[in-house]
Amino acid sequence: MTTQHLHPSRRNVLLAGASLLAGAQNVFAQRGDTIKIGSARAMTGLVASSFAPLYVSVKIAVEEINAKGGILGRQVEIVEADDESSPAKEPAVMRKLIDSGAQALLGPVGSSHTIAAATTTTAAKVIHAGGGWAEELADGLKYPYHYQFTYNTGHQGEAIARLIVEKLKLKKVGILQENSGLGESGGAATVRALKKRGLEPVGTEVYPPNATDLKVYLNKLRAAGADAIVLWNSPVQGMLLTAAGLQAMKWYPALFGGNSLFSNTVLENTDPEVLKNAYGTLIKTMTYSATEAPGARQVAYAKRVVTFPESKFWEINAAISPFYDYLHLLKVVVDNEKRFDTERIKKAFDATKNYDGMIGSISFSPENHCALTGDQMVMATLLSGKDARSMGVFRERA
């Protein structure tokens, strides 16, 4: 007998029972499922080794989150895809992760890579945190679903120019930038910040990411009279080649740049003469001074970071990765909302004020998707990495 021949009231009871059973089965299945987070990363190619440390934070965060019951009572599962170190691959990689069932995305690392990825995640309306420092990536109107859990090149340019002009009183600044999203954004931010203080760069040189020797570019900046160089590089090769070039030329100008200067490989393989006046931008929570030590929370985290083989030589970038705070804030927001609803998560992210993150106090607005303000980053010395107080992770403020 089919339900259409039953008495209406009996048919309704059976239908309701079937609906409840199906609902119960769906809830049971959902509880047995995982929350999938897609991770785009360079597993092969030019930047694979340089960017690998930034994914250590993903392992630590997922372990901590799952130990506390996961998200919505479900364990978090990271689904990875290789972008082969190529920005051109990012749209297909992000699409692959979305199609695999990822409910939110992280990565890739690199500004050019993240910009290419954010175009796809914006169209797909998927919550996303990349590992890019370009100012463009903080634009909540252009990339409404992308969040930058760090400072950006605008903040860095200001800090670099402030140290060069106001403290060190240097006058002739040359810029050496990688031909990438980071290089372009960082170079522009530096020029803007210098002009604000009445200085024009004496020269700007742009090198390809696959360069094997930077002496030709450095020689042009020396010929222009530079007594300071601002280096904008993504993988560590840029800093290693710059250091090798300066050492070969026996030229030791003051050197400034971003967190890409801090690799411990640089400390171990560079003449200290090159580094004695070298400074990089860094999150304030990961620095110390003569009167202030790093926080206990940051020290405990750093001790975990350095246990991972992937962190070796670039422990500092592993520790300041944007993905740790992203995943923890995602858990807080989704658990509060009691469901994984993208638009509700976006609204909650946009309303976040003063969230106590590992990297500092995190706030967003609908227009500004950069987690930090400029006063939460400082300039730090490269040579302090040899100090026992650094633990291989922290650096002393300039």
Image (spheres, grey):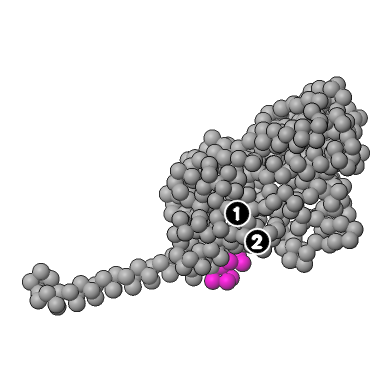
Q: Nearer the viewer, residue 264 or 296?
A: 296
Residue 339 in picture, x, y percent from top left: 45, 65
Earlier-in-chain disc, 2 versus 1: 2
Residue at figure coordinates x 74%, y 32% from the top left: 191
Q: Mark 2 packing: few (<14 Cα in 10 Å), some, or many (20+)?
A: few
- Callout 1 amino acid: Phe
Disc 1 designates what residue? 364
Name the dominant secondary structure of the magenta segment. helix
Residue 186 in picture, x, y percent from top left: 70, 37
351 relative to 2 in the view: left or right: right
Can see residue 162?
yes
Residue at figure coordinates x 70%, y 33% from the top left: 188
Residue 67 in picture, x, y percent from top left: 58, 70
Q: CA distance from mark 2 to mark 1?
A: 9 Å
Residue at figure coordinates x 55%, y 55% from the top left: 350
Residue 371 in picture, x, y percent from top left: 64, 53
- The kind of secondary structure element at disc 2 is loop
Q: Nearer the viewer, residue 299 or 140?
A: 140
The quarter of the image holding the N terminus is bottom left
Report the span colored magenta: 63-69
Q: Mark 1 packing: few (<14 Cα in 10 Å), some, or many (20+)?
A: many
Disc 2 designates what residue? 354
Residue at figure coordinates x 12%, y 71% from the top left: 3
